[in-house]
Amino acid sequence: NAGVTQTPKFQVLKTGQSMTLQCAQDMNHNSMYWYRQDPGMGLRLIYYSASEGTTDKGEVPNGYNVSRLNKREFSLRLESAAPSQTSVYFCASSEGRESETYNSPLHFGNGTRLTVT
Amino acid sequence: QKEVEQNSGPLSVPEGAIASLNCTYSDRGSQSFFWYRQYSGKSPELIMFIYSNGDKEDGRFTAQLNKASQYVSLLIRDSQPSDSATYLCAVARGNTPLVFGKGTRLSVIA
């Protein structure tokens, strides 16, 4: 029962390097999300995909791009990493049907701890 | 900007006591409310969610929602040292993404 799987778990980058964080879910969820968590800042939404084929910016999208590859997979790319992107990144998914009045709970992956030097 | 406010704590309670965690939100149109628990170095895990005014109970946990006053609370009865964690409140309007508070750190003292 994998749920939401993120890779890698840890990564160290130098300023200017690029990388892609991978996320996959096996719960047949429609919506997927990328959050970052910094000390004292809580969880902040970077990008989300309400359904396959759509992506939208969240609160802190600058410096990131995303791809909803298919219903299962949602990747986050850092094109030119900066020290300000040092953070813990969480991918999450939810049922997220658009007809719902209420939102459904998020299920989180285990996180990627990224350090940019 | 939609805001979700939580006291950062730490909130210290003795083992066996009731822990009361509070959360206020700014968007009066919010309809979905969630409580997550996060242990240090781990990912958030869902405790419970509530959509309607009033109380919702699940084991030792009770969520209380008051939309008129724009607050939601989480009560933990018979607190255990294993309940020591950061508790995150999250709020959403319709099917839009959840907005999280910064969390309250709870410490249960044996």
Image (spheres, rainbow, N blue to C red):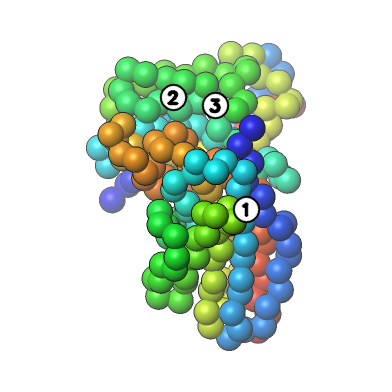
Residue found at x 68% / y 32%: A86
Q: Determine crowd level at label 1: few under 14, some 14-19, many 20+ residues with C-alpha closer than 10 A.
A: many
The amino acid type, in three-letter code, at marker 3 is Gly
Report the residue at 52% width, 21% height from top: A57
- Image location of residue A39, percent across then percent down: 71, 45
Question: Quick check: B79 above or below B6?
Answer: below
Mark 1 near mark 2, Cβ–Cβ under 8 Å?
no
Q: CA distance from mark 2 to mark 3?
A: 15 Å
Q: Which residue is mark 1?
A: B24
Residue B42 location (% of width, % of height): 55, 53
Q: Disc 2 marks which amino acid? A: Ser
Q: Residues within 10 Å of mark 3 (few under 14, many from 20)?
A: some
Residue drawn 53% across and 83% down? B78
Asked whether the residues under marks 2 and 3 belong to the same chain, the reply is: yes
Residue at mark 1: chain: B
Label 1 sits on what residue type?
Thr
The tag on residue A75 is: 2
Vertical arrangement, residue A72 with respect to residue B12, above or below = above
Q: Circle 3 sits on which residue?
A: A58
Q: Total marks drawn?
A: 3
Q: Chain of mark 2?
A: A
